Image (cartoon, grey):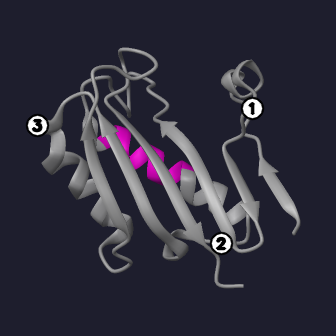
Amino acid sequence: MKRENILTGSPWEDKMGYCRAVRVGNFIEVSGTVAIVDGDKVKADDAYAQTLNILERIEKVLEDLNAGMKDVIRTRIFTTDVTTFEEVAKAHATFFKDVKPTTGFYEVSKLVAPEYLVEIEFTAIAAE
């Protein structure tokens, strides 16, 4: 089967030797993704904005792989503060209210940098 890698230009891709997403056949895995915290629209203390930013960016990654959010079958959500559940869930539901992928919500002690509150991994199976 053909393998397709999606690179986004993140400095971590070369540093770690990974890519944002891999598609093999109809199966798509998306690496753990954090928000682009700009201090304006997406702040270090705003789990809702961070989650929305992640979802918007991954929507584009999936489009680049000829898939969409409707093809997502699983999300794995990691947070440094489990009390942000309501904010994260609200953002998640804006994309997945009708799709309803399986998911997990996990508190971890740290993510890659202190400004990140949320990191999400995705699994999708494209319809085509």
Q: In this orientation, which residue lies closer to the viewer: 91 or 80?
A: 80
Q: Residue shown at 33%/80% (left/top)?
A: 98
Image height of 114 relative to 82, above or below: above
How many discs appear?
Answer: 3
Magenta stretch secondary structure, dominant: helix
Task: Measuring from the top left, give residue 20's x and y in whole percent.
Answer: 66, 43
> What is the number of the mark on residue 83?
3
1 or 3: tag closer to the N-terminus: 1
| Residue stretch rendered in magenta on the structure | 49-57
- Quarter of the image with the N terminus in it: bottom right
Label 2: few (<14), some or many (≥20) within 10 Å?
A: many
Task: Measuring from the top left, give residue 26's x and y in whole percent.
Answer: 71, 74
Image height of 114 relative to 46, above or below: above
Residue 97, image quadrant: bottom left
Q: CA distance from mark 2 to mark 3?
A: 32 Å
Residue 31, image quadrant: top right
Q: Residue shown at 65%/72% (left/top)?
A: 67
Q: Residue shown at 50%/76% (left/top)?
A: 70
Label 1: few (<14), some or many (≥20) within 10 Å?
A: few
Label 3: few (<14), some or many (≥20) within 10 Å?
A: few
Q: Indicate the amino acid at tag 1.
A: Gly
2 or 1: tag closer to the N-terminus: 1
Disc 3 on helix, strand or loop? helix
Disc 1 on helix, strand or loop? loop
> What is the number of the mark on residue 9?
1
Q: Indicate the amino acid at tag 3.
A: Thr
55 in the magenta segment: yes
> What is the number of the mark on residue 67?
2
2 or 3: tag closer to the N-terminus: 2
93 in the magenta segment: no
